[in-house]
Amino acid sequence: MIELTDEMRDSLASALADKLPVTVCYVDVDGQPQISFRGTAQVHSSDQIATWARDPNGGLPNAIGDRPRLSLLYRNPGAQLGWQFQGRAHIDESDAARDKIYDASPEVERNRDEEKNGKAIVIDIDRVIARGQTLMER
């Protein structure tokens, strides 16, 4: 069972301000693995993480239709915290999800997409790993 913790919620919420943005790994439309930083990664529900993709035509939004599996990595060496979140992503076009994810994103990220043209991406978490050990699994 996946039940993301308050510590995970708080850590992701402050990741960008702490200069520890979450890293996401996905496979692009050409089959090439890609790694990118996500300053908007946030706990969306007890078993979901969300992120705002400023560029609606960017690599991640385009890739997840055919290749929804991805991994996110949060690491805070100072606090000796680190989690890998594995899951399946989808774009949520609903106004409620778009508003919630955009509004919960750091202001600096919202300012880079003031017109709110981006995409709300929701990841259903299947596994949480820390120090090589599975902590939670769907």
Image (cartoon, grey):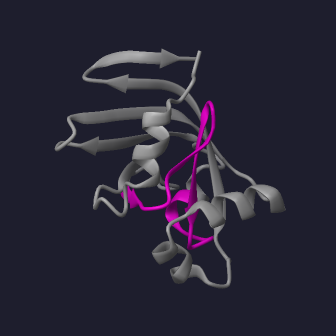
- Vertical comparison of 123 with 61: above or below: above
- Vertical comparison of 23 with 126: above or below: below
Magenta highlight on residue 119: no
Quadrant assignment, res 94: bottom right
Viewer-closest of 80 and 24? 80
Tell whether 78 sits left or right of 24. left
- Vertical comparison of 113 with 6: above or below: below
Write down the region rendered in magenta: 36-60
Tell whether 9 sits left or right of 118. left
Label tally:
0
Residue at horizontal 37%, vertical 33%? 84
Residue 19 percent coordinates (x, y) = 28, 61
Q: Quadrant of the C terminus?
A: top right
Residue 70 percent coordinates (x, y) = 48, 40
Residue 20 percent coordinates (x, y) = 29, 55
Residue at horizontal 64%, vertical 66%? 103
Q: Please say whether residue 127 is visible from this viewpoint.
A: yes
Q: Quadrant of the N terminus?
A: top right
Q: Quick one: which residue is furthest to the left in this view?
A: 78
Q: Please say whether residue 94 is visible from this viewpoint.
A: no
Quadrant assignment, res 78: top left
Residue at horizontal 48%, vertical 54%? 28
Residue 115 percent coordinates (x, y) = 67, 84
Viewer-closest of 13 and 56? 13
